[in-house]
Image (cartoon, grey):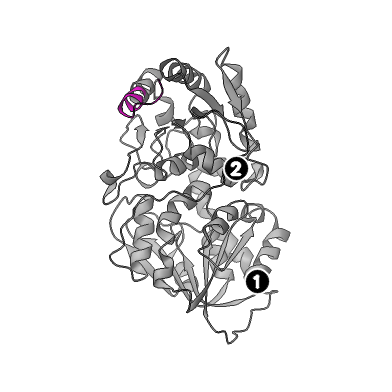
Amino acid sequence: MKSDRYFSNVFLKIYIFLLKHPILRNMKILAYYIDFMILLFIRKPKKLQTAKKQIVIVYNLNLGDCIVWLCSIRRIREIYPENEYEMTLICQKGIHYIFEKEEIFNHVIPLNFTEATFRMKKRREIMKILRSKYYDILLDPIGVAECTTNVLMSRAIVAEKKITICDMTIKRHAAPKWLINSIYSEYIKVTKPELSLMEFYSEFIKGLGMTDFKFAFQKPISTPSSLELPNRYFIIFPSASQYLKCWPIDRYGEIARRIHEKTGLMLLLCGTDKDREIVDKFRSILGDLPYIDIVGKTSVLEFVSIIQNASLIVTNDTSTYHIAAVSEVSVAIITGGYTYKRYVSYEFEDKEAFKRPCIIVHEMPCFNCENRCPYVTNKSKYWPCLEKISTSYAWEKIEALINANHIGR
C-alpha cells in the first residue's frame, strides 16, 4: 500500500516496549489526567436543534479489525435508520477509505490518533475536533479493557448518552471502574469468556437492540488494481505490526519455494512502505524463485482487492488474514497464541457455513496471555510460541489446504 500510513514507527516502538514490560501498560491511565488539563482549555459545544438525532462512533483500530467489524456494523442502520439519525464515524487516518466506500455513515472523519499518542500539540488539535459538535449518542464498540485511545477520545467528545461494551470475564481491567463510569453512561456486559472478535462485535450489536443478530462473512468493497498482475498468484506476507510477531524469514523462504513447486503459481509481494525492510530480507533469500514486487504501489482499497483475488495467502499478519478470511480466500496464518481466541480462532455461530481459514500454531498452556508473555525478554526476536512452529509442520498444514481447495496445477 502507498505511504498514507496508519501506524507510525515511533508508535510501534512504544507498543513493542510495552509488550516487553506489560506492567507499564497500566500507566496509560496517566493520559486521563493529562487530557484533563488539555480539555480545561477547550470549550464544550452547545446542543443544537437538528432534524435528525446525531450519533458518533469512535473506531480507531487498524485495517484487519475494521474488516471484521464491517461484517457487523453494516446492520447498524436497522437499529438507527437513516431517516431518524445522522451518523458520524471517527476513525484512524488511512482506514477511512474503507468506510467511505461502504457508504454506511453520513460523515467519516479521519484522524491521526497514533501521532496524538506522543505529540501533545497533535493531541490538542484532535480534541478540538472531537469537541466541535454535540452528539445525542456516542457508540464505542472497541470496549474498555484498558485505558486506550478509544476510551480517552470518548471522554473528550460531548454526548448526551455514551455507550460502550465491557468484557466482564477479563480478570485484569487496566481501566478502573470509576474511570469507565465517569465517561460512559451505559455499557453492554459480555459474560461469555474468550469471545472471538466477531462474537465480541456481535454482542455489541445485540446489546444495542438487535437481539437476533448473527455474524456472517461479508466481503469488503474494494477497488480493482490498475497494476498488471497474473491471473493466478499466491501471496506470502512475512511482515507484521511488530517484529515479535514475524515468523523467521528463512522459514518463509522455504515455504514459498514449496508452494511454487507444487502449484506453479507466481509469488506476489505486497504491503505498505513500512513492510519494505522485511520484504527486502525475504527477497534476498528467494534465489531464482520468480516473484512480482508491488510493495507500496497500491492504495488500501486496491490492496484489499489484491488479497481477494489471490489463490492462496500465507501470513503472520492479522490484517491480511482478516481480509482473506471474511472474503473466503484460501488463507493460512502462522501465529503465536498471544490473542488466539480473540483474533485468530474465528469461532462464531454458523462458522461451518463459510470457508474456514487454516491456522498454524504451536499450542502452549499460556495461550491467550493478552500480550503479557512471561517468556519475552529484551533479547527476544520472536514470540516463543511463534518461534516453536517448524517449517515442516507449517508446510504439512499448507499442503493440506492446497490439496483440499485444489489450488494451482
For the N terminus, give its image quadrant: top right
Q: Residue furthest top?
A: 288
Q: Nearer the viewer, residue 69 or 328?
A: 328
Residue 40 in the figure: left or right of residue 380: right
Mark count:
2
Kindly indicate the quadrant of the structure image that contains residue 169. Answer: bottom left
Instruction: Please tell me whether mark 2 sits on a helix, a strand or a loop.
Output: helix
Do we see residue 377 in this rendering? no
Residue at the image position 37 percent from the left and 49 percent from the top: 217
Residue at the image position 46 percent from the left and 60 percent from the top: 175
- Counting residues from the start of the chain, the first of labels 2 and 1 encountered is 2
Residue identifier under label 2: 12
Q: Position of residue 106 (x, y in %)?
A: 56, 69
Kindly indicate the quadrant of the structure image that contains residue 170. Answer: bottom left
Q: Position of residue 332 (x, y in %)?
A: 40, 32
Q: Position of residue 255 (x, y in %)?
A: 45, 20
Residue 400 in the figure: left or right of residue 96: left
Q: Which residues are magenta?
A: 399-409
Which of the labelled discs sits on residue 215, or is there none?
none
Q: Nearer the viewer, residue 44 or 38?
A: 44
Residue identifier under label 1: 39
Q: Nearer the viewer, residue 292 or 153?
A: 292
Q: Residue furthest right?
A: 121
Residue at the image position 41 percent from the left and 23 percent from the top: 408
Amino acid at dot 2: Leu
Amino acid at dot 1: Leu
Q: Position of residue 325 (x, y in %)?
A: 40, 41
